Image: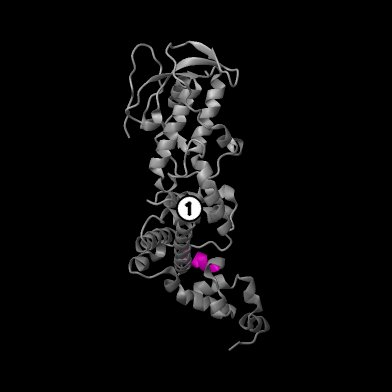
Amino acid sequence: MRNETKRTQGNIRVFLATFALCGVVSGLAIVAPQSATAASANLKANQVSGQCSKLGATSVSATSGTTLTCAAFTNLGSLKGSNVQYRWSSLYTDKNVVHTLVNNSLIAYDRTFSSKAEQQMYEGMITSDLEFGAFINLLVTMSKNSFPGFAELISKDKTLRDVVTPWATQLANARSLPSQTFNQTGEGFLLALATGSTTVNQDAFDALFAKSESLRAYADTVDHDYWVNFSNPTQAQITQRFTFIDSLLSLSDSDAKAAYLAKIQLNAKKIYPSFVAALDNGQTIDQVMAPWVAHFADQLELYRGAINPIQERTLIQVAMTPPASMVAFDAIIAHDPRWATTSKAKAASSGNTSF
């Protein structure tokens, strides 16, 4: 991204055409802050009005009755090769109005300035509706370049938010999640959808969703094998997991699975440091802990197949810090409330040996 500043003669004030202006793309922030939900309605860039010849001259619009001023105009939407023209325009006299317009525009097109000072500098340059229209044109062009899948749908009258929201809502419904979570979880999915070379349609969405579901199913298996899944996940944990899965959707199926597996293996090594060597040799936590799980089930007289290790605090503690022997493990198991109901415990309490 590079500056393409158009210098003009004299003291003509023009809005600088620079890709660095709003060069920070945060992805597709689908749901904006509540205060800006109606922002799109006020972002329509004004049509370029008729030309004028004397900078600063005024005229009353025959249609609206508002006072127009002859101001400089540069069509920044084209980004380069723009020629400064004089056009009739309404001027902005309230800095707060300009600040609100710019903030709403950035939200609607999912852009940010690199600093508050930079934003204030550019806000100071927006003195007319023509310059604001040029600002919108620039955001439109940048959005089309960044998200080619939505390029045909994005315009001055249909913002990036307008285009993306229906797909984000569909994604939220498909995952049975509240739509406000998609400031995070929808980002990778919608970004993968939007950066495709063809215009987004229902078939493209369905194909990508099927890929995400396939990867999620694989993730479920990996999480189970390495004992890192959540037994009763919170909304935040569900969101975090989808965020990572969605971030892999731009990869091939094999690369996405390999990336997920690598991350979970690394997490498992941090959670269960005693088994790092075994993990490096290709074993899973489920395989390493199989003898411990079997002994745990036998001692508590439980059906092995019904045990979900991640829900058993005793097994998790043992995996994190293994006891020195099975005898030490038996002492730990004896603290489990279910131990008292076993035949061995009842026999021991009655003085009889249980076989």
Direction from residue 75 to residue 35 in the image, left or right: right
Main SS of the magenta part reads helix
Name which residue lies at 36% across and 62% down: 258
Residue 113 seen in the current view:
no
Name which residue lies at 65% across and 76% down: 340
Indicate the quadrant containing the C terminus: top left, top right, bottom left or bottom right. bottom right
Q: Quadrant location of residue 64? A: top right
Residue range of the region highlighted in magenta in the rendering:
314-320
Kindly identify the amino acid type of the residue bearing the numbered disc 1. Thr
Direction from residue 23 to residue 316 in the image, left or right: right
For label 1, the crowd category at 10 Å Cα-Cα, with few meaning under 14, some 14 to 19 and many 20 or more, is some
Is 44 or 225 nearer to us in this picture? Answer: 44
Q: Which x, y percent locates residue 277? A: 35, 66
Q: Please say if 351 is above or below 217.
A: below
Residue 80 falls inside the magenta stretch: no
Indicate the quadrant containing the N terminus: top left, top right, bottom left or bottom right. top left
Is 340 or 147 nearer to us in this picture? Answer: 147
Q: Which x, y percent locates residue 301? A: 59, 81
- Residue ID for mark 1: 243
Residue 318 falls inside the magenta stretch: yes
